[in-house]
Image (cartoon, helix red, strand yellow):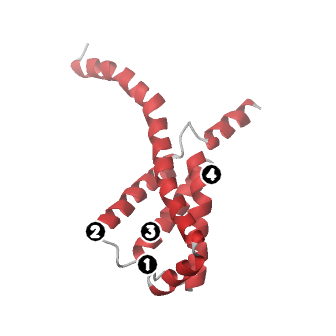
Amino acid sequence: MHPVARLVAFARPFVAFADTWLRPLALVWARVVVGLVFFRSGLTKLDDWQTTLLLFTEEYHVPLLPPAVAAALGTAGEVLLPPLLIAGLAGRFAAAGLFVVNATAVISYPALTETTREFHLYWAMLLALVASVGPGTLSLDAWLCRRARAA
């Protein structure tokens, strides 16, 4: 047997293990980590709406939107999309929506430090991953697909 073929044969069980167990768990981890960050941020905005409006008026400069509209849309995105993302229900939609919220935050708040920009980049990478490959087999999307095929 050729050495490359031997290497491929040796790696096959590891790749199967990664596909079966590691990928689904990594996608759950990505969904939960990012979802909780944005959900907590949205709850903070809801907790003190007057301060939220003040921040969107004075600090956050969202392009093309009046501050009150930007505050309402941003908060709605941060409160409504994370539960969908975490559950993996409309997972790609939720990830794409939070990607837009995240990008808007980076664009509209010039006072971000280098460290906070790195966090936003990290969240963007995880959201792009879920948006591009889907929420994985441990999601409501996958469960609904399996159930629809069985019916």
Q: Earlier in the sequence, mark 2 or mark 3?
A: 3
Which residue in the structure is indicated by mark 3? 103
Instruction: Assign a secondary structure to mark 2.
Output: helix
What residue type is disc 3 on?
Answer: Ala
Rendering coords of residue 37 (x, y %): 47, 57
Q: Earlier in the sequence, mark 1 or mark 2?
A: 1
Q: Residue furthest top?
A: 1
Q: Earlier in the sequence, mark 1 or mark 4?
A: 4
Which residue in the structure is indicated by mark 1? 108
128 relative to 146, above or below: below
What residue type is disc 1 on?
Answer: Ser
Q: Residue at x 55, y 84 (%)?
A: 67
The residue closer to the viewer here, 128 or 77, is: 77
Which residue in the structure is indicated by mark 2? 114
Report crowding for label 2: few under 14, some 14 to 19, many 20 or more residues within 10 A (C-alpha).
few
Q: Residue at x 57, y 74 (%)?
A: 48
Report crowding for label 3: few under 14, some 14 to 19, many 20 or more residues within 10 A (C-alpha).
some
Query: Which marked residue is nearer to the observer: mark 1 or mark 4?
Result: 1
* Mark 1 and mark 4: Cα distance apart in space: 27 Å
Which residue in the structure is indicated by mark 4? 90
Report crowding for label 4: few under 14, some 14 to 19, many 20 or more residues within 10 A (C-alpha).
some
**Toward which corner of the image does residue 145 lie, by quadrant?**
top right
Q: Are marks 3 and 4 in contact (CB under 8 Å)?
A: no
Instruction: Assign a secondary structure to mark 4.
Output: loop
